[in-house]
Amino acid sequence: TLPGAGAEAEPLICTRHHAIDWNFVGVMRPRPNKWRVELGPRAATSGRAEQWKEWSFAADEHGQSYYMERWARIAGDGEGIGSTLALRFCGLPDAFLLVVGDHFAYATARPECPLVAEAHPDGTASAPSLVDLVDAAIARGDRDTAEKWLGLEGGHGLVSKDWEIDASTHPWREGRQRLTPNSIQGAIVDSQIAGDVTNDQHAMALARGAEDMVVIDGQPWEIMERHGLATSSDIL
């Protein structure tokens, strides 16, 4: 929903769609991951909320949300009006790369997804969480499966620090560069090409339904969303 105006306006309702799910254990969620937003004070410069609370849409028998999270803007995020870019890899494994102001974050799916035991007859998962699956694999001496379950990676860093990863679910990646100065080689936005894009790279993106794209280290990525980046040259 869109935020309303005035004191009696309905709250903003969002639904989180899962493409890469750390805790997926073979059974789909019984209901959408829906939540509502309680906006905080707005910044004088941008007019955007400086912080907000996320409340679960689902509630208990007393009408209380099951959880609450407080979110806040951080230095270098563009204050909600800076440049943003959301990319999705056009191959496998599935991967996303997001840039918000000076910050970048990424998520890469497991290169291989181990088989999950069949669900119980009532439809519930055979294991309640990823932790249980990993622990069970370790307990039976199956390190290979445990490592595959832990293969999903997420990380963060700053563009201004040469794309250096400063936090990762794979700690040994911290201190390395997610991208180098030569990584972004070409882009297509609104049919306009900048840099180097081969026919094969373009065809691979089109096969995924991606008309706007970026070539990173020789591989095509779909441009899912962009703000403040009007042309392909802006992206380069």
Image (cartoon, rainbow, N blue to C red):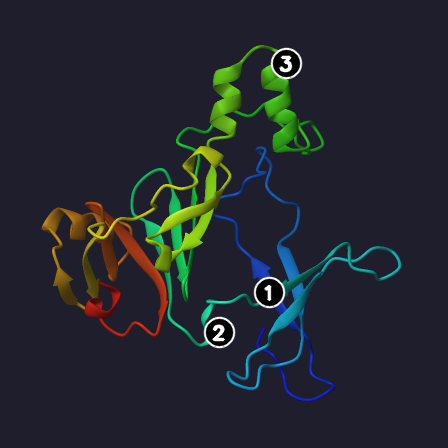
Can see residue 12?
yes
Q: Position of residue 174 (x, y in %)?
A: 43, 40
Q: For residue 233, which quarter of the picture?
A: bottom left
Q: Nearer the viewer, residue 136 or 77?
A: 77
Q: Which residue is mark 1?
A: 14
Task: Name the spot of residue 116 as percent of width and height, x first.
Answer: 55, 25
Q: Quadrant of the C terminus?
A: bottom left
Residue identified by numbered label 2: 80
Identity, as a three-letter code, of the amino acid under mark 3: Ala
Q: Indicate which disc residue 139 carries.
A: 3
CA gap between label 1 and label 3 equals 39 Å
- Please tell me in which quadrant of the rendered image residue 211 appears: bottom left
Task: Report the Cα–Cα distance between label 1 and label 2.
Answer: 17 Å
Q: Residue at x 41, y 73 (%)?
A: 82
Q: Earlier in the sequence, mark 3 or mark 2?
A: 2
Classify 112 as above or below 80: above
